[in-house]
Image (cartoon, coloured by chain):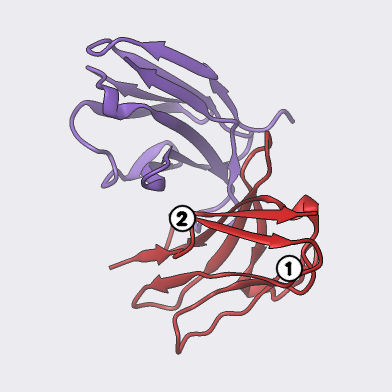
C-alpha cells in the first residue's frame, strides 16, 4: 500500500484564486482527517470524517474553507478565495476505527498564496 | 477545554545526554495520549501511546494524571533522534496535537 496519497505536493497561487487539495486515504480506513501545519500554530485539526460523514468541522477557519468526502477513497479540501495567511502545509491522515489512535499521514501539500 | 501544550519549541542536546520533551494536557475526561515524530523528509508517524506502556527506540513516556503531563524521555540521545516531536490527545474520535518540539542532537 502506498499509504495516504495527497496532491498536489506543492501549490503556488495568487490571492483570490481557488485552491483544491486532494487526498486518497489508505484502503479500508474509515476515518479521515485534514490538518494544517504552520510555524506559529503547529498542527491544527481542520475537519475529520468518519464513514464519509463530517463529524467535527469546528477547526475550519472560516467559510472560505470547505471539505468533502464523496466516497471512501477520496476527499478534497477547498479554499475559495485563497489569502496569503492560508499559506501552510496541509496534511491528510486516515485511520481505522472510530476512536482516534494511530493516524497514518500523507506527505502533505505545501500551499503558498502570494 | 481540550488542549495540548509543549512549552519548548526547540531542545538541543549532545549525543549521549538524557532527553526530556515536555507535554502537558488539559482534558476533563480520561485521556488517551500519544507521541508522534516527524523525521526529516519523512511522514509524521506514531512513536508511542500511553496505553501500551512500551519503549520505542529507547523512548518512554509516563502519564501523570496529577500533573496532567505526558513527558517523553530517553536516557541517552542519539543523533538519529533529531526530529520534530508532537504530543497528541485523543478526546473521542479526533486527535489534537501540541505545537511540537524540535529535538536537535549534536555529535
Contact between marks 2 and 1 (CB within 8 A): the answer is: no
Any part of residue A74 in sight:
no
Q: Residues within 10 Å of mark 2 (few under 14, many from 20)?
A: many
> In the image, which lettered chain appears purple?
A
Q: Which mark is residue B95?
A: 2
| Vertical placement of residue B41 versus B22, above or below | above
How many numbered discs? 2
Label 1, secondary structure: give it.
loop
Q: Left or right: where does residue B99 sit relative to residue B42?
A: left
Q: Left or right: where does residue A23 sit relative to residue B91?
A: right
Screen quadrant of the C terminus of chain A: top left
| Vertical placement of residue B38 versus B55, above or below | above
Q: Which mark is residue B59?
A: 1
Any part of residue A114 in sight:
yes
Residue A11 x, y percent position in the rendering: 45, 15
Q: Are marks 2 and 1 on the same chain?
A: yes
Residue A21 x, y percent position in the rendering: 43, 21
| Alpha carbon distance from label 2 to label 1 | 21 Å
The quarter of the displayed image where residue A69 is located: top left
Screen quadrant of the N terminus of chain A: top right
Q: Residue at x 39, y 46 (%)?
A: A45
Of pointers 2 and 1, the one earlier in the residue sequence: 1
> In the image, which lettered chain appears red?
B
Q: Residue at x 72, y 55 (%)?
A: B105
Q: Which mark is residue A46?
A: none
Label 2, secondary structure: give it.
loop
Amino acid at each position: 500500500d502506498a499509504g495516504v496519497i495527497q496532491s498536489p505536493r506543492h501549490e503556488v497561487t495568487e490571492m483570490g484564486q481557488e485552491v483544491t487539495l486532494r487526498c486518497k486515504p489508505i484502503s479500508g480506513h474509515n476515518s479521515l482527517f485534514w490538518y494544517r501545519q504552520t510555524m506559529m500554530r503547529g498542527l491544527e485539526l481542520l475537519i475529520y470524517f468518519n464513514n464519509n460523514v463530517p463529524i467535527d468541522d469546528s477547526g475550519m477557519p472560516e467559510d472560505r474553507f470547505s471539505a468533502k468526502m464523496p466516497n471512501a477513497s477520496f476527499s478534497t479540501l477547498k479554499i475559495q478565495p485563497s489569502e496569503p495567511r492560508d499559506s501552510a502545509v496541509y496534511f491528510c491522515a486516515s485511520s481505522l476505527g472510530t476512536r482516534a489512535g494511530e493516524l497514518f499521514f500523507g506527505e502533505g501539500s505545501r500551499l503558498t498564496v502570494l | 477545554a481540550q488542549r495540548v501544550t509543549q512549552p519548548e519549541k526547540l531542545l538541543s542536546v549532545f549525543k549521549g545526554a538524557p532527553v526530556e520533551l515536555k507535554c502537558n494536557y488539559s482534558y476533563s475526561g480520561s485521556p488517551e495520549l500519544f507521541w508522534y515524530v516527524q523525521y526529516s523528509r519523512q511522514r509524521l508517524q506514531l512513536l508511542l501511546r500511553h496505553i501500551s506502556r512500551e519503549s520505542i527506540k529507547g523512548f518512554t513516556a509516563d502519564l501523570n494524571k496529577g500533573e496532567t503531563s505526558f513527558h517523553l524521555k530517553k536516557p541517552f540521545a542519539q543523533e538519529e533522534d533529531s526530529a520534530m516531536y508532537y504530543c497528541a490527545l485523543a478526546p473521542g474520535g479526533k486527535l489534537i496535537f501540541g505545537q511540537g518540539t524540535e529535538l536537535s542532537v549534536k555529535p
